[in-house]
Every structure is written in C-alpha cells, then in structure tokens.
Image (tube, rainbow, N blue to C red):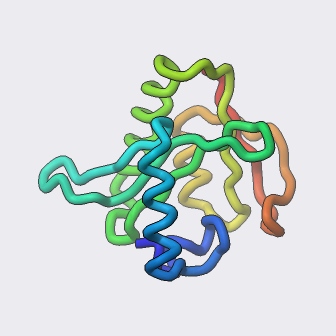
C-alpha cells in the first residue's frame, strides 16, 4: 500500500516507499498506541491506518487507506472511531490534520466529521488547510 503512488501522493515524502521503507514505517506505527489499524469487517484484511503523531509539538491526525477501498465511507467511520477512542485514552484538548488543497476527498471527510478550518498554509511544500477538532 505504501508503494502505491495514488495512496502516497498526499502522504509523507509524496512518493511510493520502497519495501524496506514501508517495513520500517509499519514497525514504527505498530509501536505507537495512538495509531489504529483499519481492517475490513468481513475479512479482517488490513486496509489502512489512522491516528495521531506529534509533529513539532503539535498532535497531528492522519490516515490512509488502500485505494480500492476509497469512496466507501471507510475513512470517515475509521476517523470517527479513532478520535472517540483517543479522546478517552489520551489527554488531548484538540487534534489537527493538514489536508492538501487538491485532496478533496479528505476535505470532505474532515467536514463530515465536523472538523473546522483553522488556518490555510503550507506543509512540506504543499498548500492546504489545517483542520482542527476540539475534544
């Protein structure tokens, strides 16, 4: 999945990861209790991740899903469940997510979840919006 250019166009280095890079990322992600696996409810197949990580002292929310599962409401539901779980387990007041200007699908997810645009700016050279939700 992290080798899929469609999945990676808005994530991290904005390029597909090598197998070694993806393995390293997954090992790190699995050690983080604030990140959650997204699995197909019928088959238990791994289809993505969501959760928070700290970037420059700010808790940043993120998610990704295999491209064949896009457009099915999975991201919205997974993010909703993850935020609810994080609110009970982690001492958080607010969480933000940066969404690139041309990532319309993720903007719709944030808006469905009630996240508010707090700032317009750049992250990693990409123009977009910072959405925030207060827990």
Residue at (52% x, 74% y) in the render? 21
Residue at image coords 27%, 51%: 39
Q: Position of residue 88 (x, y in %)?
A: 47, 17
Q: Residue 83's x, y, as percent?
A: 50, 31
Indicate the quadrant where residue 127 lies.
bottom right
Q: Is residue 65 above or below residue 75?
A: below
Apparent side of residue 58 relative to residue 16 in the rendered image (left or right): right
35 above or below 28?
Answer: above
Work out which quarter of the rendered image holds the C terminus and state it: top right
Residue placed furthest toward the left: 42
* Vertical order, 130 against 126 (above or below): above
Q: Is residue 90 left or right of residue 121?
A: left
Q: Between 68 and 108, which is closer to the camera in this rendering?
A: 68
Q: How many marks?
A: 0
Q: Quadrant of the N terminus?
A: bottom left
State the residue in front, 20 or 103.
20
Residue 77 in the image: state x and y as whole percent.
38, 41
Residue 68: quarter of image: bottom left
Q: At 32% across and 60% down in the image, what residue appears?
A: 47
Taking the image as shown, residue 59 lies to the left or right of residue 84, namely right
**41 above or below 70?**
above
Q: Residue at x 53, y 78 (%)?
A: 17
Residue 72 % position (x, y): 34, 56
């Amino acid at each position: 999945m992290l080798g899929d250019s469609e999945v990676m166009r808005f994530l991290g280095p904005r390029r597909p990861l090598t197998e070694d890079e993806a393995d390293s990322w997954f090992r790190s992600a699995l050690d983080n209790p604030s990140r959650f696996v997204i699995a197909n409810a019928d088959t238990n197949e791994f289809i993505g991740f969501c959760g928070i990580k700290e970037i420059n002292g700010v808790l940043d929310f993120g998610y990704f899903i295999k491209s064949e599962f896009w457009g099915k409401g999975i991201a919205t539901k997974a993010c909703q469940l993850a935020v609810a779980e994080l609110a009970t387990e982690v001492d958080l007041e607010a969480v933000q997510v940066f969404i690139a200007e041309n990532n319309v699908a993720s903007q719709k997810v944030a808006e469905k979840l009630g996240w508010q645009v707090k700032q317009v700016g750049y992250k990693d050279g990409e123009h977009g919006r910072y959405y925030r939700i207060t827990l």
